[in-house]
Image (cartoon, rainbow, N blue to C red):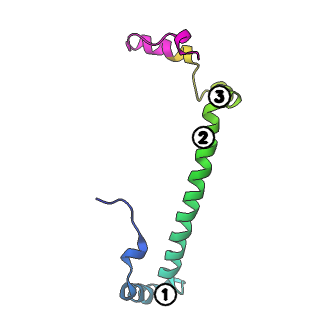
């Protein structure tokens, strides 16, 4: 099943005319055409948002100051605490920190 729903594929000219005639009483002159324009704009905004979000997230994953702030706010745990939690949960042998240093 394809999850990509494209409103413009669903609405051919006959459907547009029918739906617009039925929906005119709700205060919109051309609701289907307006909806198609809004759908296109939202796709554009979504792409812009995703590109900017990936830049910010990539920075936050590698910046020492950002990582420290996330730890201080409780969003992340320090690596030593993470390994201690793993041992308590029975995860077994974990890598030694001195092997992980480059």
Pick the residue in front: 26 or 50. Answer: 50
* Picture coordinates of residue 34, whole percent (x, y): 53, 79
Badge 1 crowding class, 10 Å Cα cut-off, few under 14, some 14 to 19, many 20 or more, is few
Q: Residue at x 54, y 11 (%)?
A: 97
Between the residue at mark 1 and the residue at mark 2, the CA separation in whole angstroms equals 46 Å
Kind of element beneath mark 1? helix
Q: Kindly identify which numbered label has been placed on residue 67.
A: 3
Q: Is residue 71 above or below residue 23?
A: above
Look at the image and say whether residue 85 sits in the magenta stretch. Answer: yes
Mark 1 sits on what residue?
25
Badge 2 crowding class, 10 Å Cα cut-off, few under 14, some 14 to 19, many 20 or more, is few
Between the residue at mark 3 and the residue at mark 1, the CA separation in whole angstroms equals 54 Å
Mark 2 sits on what residue?
57
Q: Quadrant of residue 76 in the image?
A: top right
Image: magenta residue range: 83-102
Considering every residue shown, the one lying at the far right of the view is 65
In screen coordinates, is 80 left or right of 56? left
Mark 1 and mark 2 residues within 8 Å of each other at the beta carbon = no
Mark 3 and mark 1 residues within 8 Å of each other at the beta carbon = no
Look at the image and say whether residue 22 sits in the magenta stretch. Answer: no
Q: Is residue 44 above or below residue 94?
A: below
Which of the two labelled residues, at mark 3 and mark 1, occupies the earlier sequence position? Answer: 1
Between the residue at mark 2 and the residue at mark 3, the CA separation in whole angstroms equals 11 Å
Q: Is residue 98 above or below residue 48?
A: above
Considering every residue shown, the one lying at the far left of the view is 1
Q: Residue at x 49, y 76 (%)?
A: 36
Mark 3 or mark 1, which is nearer to you?
Answer: 3
Which of the two labelled residues, at mark 2 and mark 3, occupies the earlier sequence position? Answer: 2
* Picture coordinates of residue 84, whole percent (x, y): 49, 11
Tag count in the figure? 3
In screen coordinates, is 88 left or right of 55? left
């Amino acid at each position: 099943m394809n999850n990509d729903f494209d409103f413009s594929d669903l609405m051919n000219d006959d459907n547009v005319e029918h739906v617009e005639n039925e929906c005119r009483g709700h205060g919109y002159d051309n609701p289907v055409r307006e909806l198609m324009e809004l759908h296109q704009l939202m796709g554009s905004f979504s792409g812009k948002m995703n590109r900017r979000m990936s830049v910010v997230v990539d920075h936050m994953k590698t910046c020492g100051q950002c990582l420290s702030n996330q730890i201080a706010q409780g969003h992340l745990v320090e690596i030593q605490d993470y390994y201690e939690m793993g041992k308590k949960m029975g995860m077994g042998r974990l890598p030694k920190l001195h092997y992980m240093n480059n």
